[in-house]
Image (tube, grey):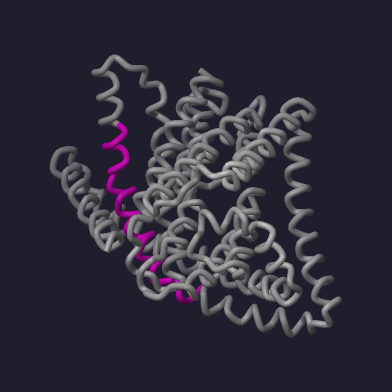
């Protein structure tokens, strides 16, 4: 039901905004831009996202099936089960969904988007096997999705690379601010869903796991910032991320061979689901991308930014951050759209300006909530998302607030 109102609302708000611009500003091209944008978004949903996803899904579902046959996914599930049995109480002990989620979170943490998506879809498929009402999201699926949309990434490699392309003096200077902002978003997401589901986070196991992960992240940050220069950070992060991924594949294959599994047949068996999953998500994906396109091309985000800028000015508050807000507002809607706005902010205000850097921190502070909801829930046919979107957007808002705060602290 939530998606129904959101999808309809995007179209209606976009239409009203376009009508206002036509009547007040005399923008006669506004309707053409909106219609052209809907066609382009529909094409992009199929040609640029769904079809390429089919190939990646085919590969990684095959690899995951090898890992399951080798027992590696089950071993991961047993390792992480003390934490997951408490924040995912609806998942039985040792269920494969736990291992699939761990693989997805690990890929996200390393910034491996191509691997994270098929692993995440596999995790959602596993969670769906435990769902008694196939059209309504379970508590576990909501917790998983909100953690995913919080976008926790250890190293924002793509953002640093873009800054380097545009000539930043220190492309990695947004590294720590991004890490802080996305970590805040993740913690807020966990706490929000835990309160809604009445999960007790104040127990020894959860606190020790969260404390240990916080210490590990802090240790990596300390090592990178004290012992590596900007070139070394980019090199180490890129090599280590892909090396870890290659090691995982090798371990899966070696483990399967030791168990005398026919590795090739196991790969083919798992890979068969890749095309089906990709075709399943196309209607959900195209529908959401087209609605987002209407909002963007109708200038709704510009209205919001202008209103916020005026409001902060009336309150006498520093509004230097408002030119970077389009990136933050677009991020929950479209990853490619927010990236374009981040690049535009760096080009307009300067790659090393406060606005340029803040736009980068916004880009790295969360993930594309609506896109992920449409993709992940659409892949298993969930139509009633319950509070997943509101909890994900609250985590996004926390990430935006943290991004502004750390940007003022580091760059203003």
Magenta stretch, overall SS: helix
Q: Position of residue 279 (x, y in %)?
A: 48, 76
Residue at horizontal 84 percent and vertical 82 percent from the top: 260
Residue at horizontal 73 percent and vertical 68 percent from the top: 72
> Does 195 sit left or right of 149 as displayed?
left
> Does 24 sit left or right of 297 as displayed?
left
Which residue is outermost to the left? 23
Q: Position of residue 326 (x, y in %)?
A: 39, 38
Residue at horizontal 46 percent and vertical 37 percent from the top: 399
Q: Position of residue 149 (x, y in %)?
A: 48, 51
**Magenta-tinted stretch:** 278-305
Residue nearest the observer in this picture, 402 or 296: 402
Which residue is outermost to the top? 316
* Residue 69 is one of the magenta-drawn residues: no
* Residue 290 is one of the magenta-drawn residues: yes
* Residue 343 visible to the viewer: no
Q: Is residue 259 above or below residue 208?
A: below
Which quadrant of the rendered structure holds the N terminus?
bottom left
Residue nearest the observer in this picture, 312 or 190: 190
Q: Position of residue 263 (x, y in %)?
A: 78, 80
């Amino acid at each position: 039901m939530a998606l129904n109102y959101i999808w309809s609302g995007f179209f209606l708000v976009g239409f009203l905004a376009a009508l206002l611009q036509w009547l007040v500003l005399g923008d006669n091209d506004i309707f053409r831009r909106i219609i052209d944008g809907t066609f382009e978004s529909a094409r992009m949903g199929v040609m640029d996202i769904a079809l390429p996803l089919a190939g990646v899904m085919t590969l990684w579902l095959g690899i995951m099936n090898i890992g399951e046959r080798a027992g590696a996914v089950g071993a991961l599930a047993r390792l992480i089960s003390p934490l997951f049995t408490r924040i995912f109480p609806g998942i039985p002990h040792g269920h494969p969904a736990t291992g699939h989620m761990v693989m997805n979170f690990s890929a996200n943490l390393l910034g491996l988007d191509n691997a994270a998506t098929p692993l995440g879809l596999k995790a959602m498929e596993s969670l769906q096997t435990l769902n008694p009402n196939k059209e309504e999201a379970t508590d576990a699926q909501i917790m998983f999705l909100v953690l995913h949309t919080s976008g926790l990434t250890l190293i924002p490699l793509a953002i640093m690379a873009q800054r380097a392309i545009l000539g930043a003096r220190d492309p990695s200077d947004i590294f720590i601010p991004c890490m802080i902002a996305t970590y805040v978003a993740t913690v807020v997401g966990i706490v929000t869903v835990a309160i809604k589901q009445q999960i007790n986070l104040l127990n020894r196991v959860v606190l020790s796991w969260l404390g240990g992960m916080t210490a590990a992240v802090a240790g990596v940050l300390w090592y990178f910032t004290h012992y590596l220069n900007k070139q070394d950070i980019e090199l180490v992060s890129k090599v280590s991320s892909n090396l870890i991924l290659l090691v995982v594949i090798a371990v899966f294959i070696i483990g399967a061979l030791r168990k005398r599994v026919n590795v090739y047949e196991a790969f083919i068996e798992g890979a068969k689901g890749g095309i089906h999953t990709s075709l399943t998500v196309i209607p959900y994906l195209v529908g959401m991308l087209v609605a987002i396109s209407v909002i963007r091309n109708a200038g709704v985000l510009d209205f919001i930014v202008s209103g916020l800028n005026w409001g902060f000015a009336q309150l006498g508050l520093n509004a230097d951050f408002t030119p970077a807000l389009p990136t933050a507002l677009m991020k929950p809607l479209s990853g490619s759209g927010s990236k374009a706005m981040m690049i535009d902010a760096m080009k307009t205000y300067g790659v090393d300006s406060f606005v340029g850097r803040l736009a980068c921190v916004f880009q790295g502070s969360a993930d594309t909530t609506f896109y992920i909801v449409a993709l992940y829930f659409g892949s298993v046919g969930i139509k009633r998302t319950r509070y997943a979107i509101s909890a994900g957007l609250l985590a996004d808002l926390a990430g935006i607030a943290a991004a502004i705060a750390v940007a003022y602290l580091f760059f203003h």
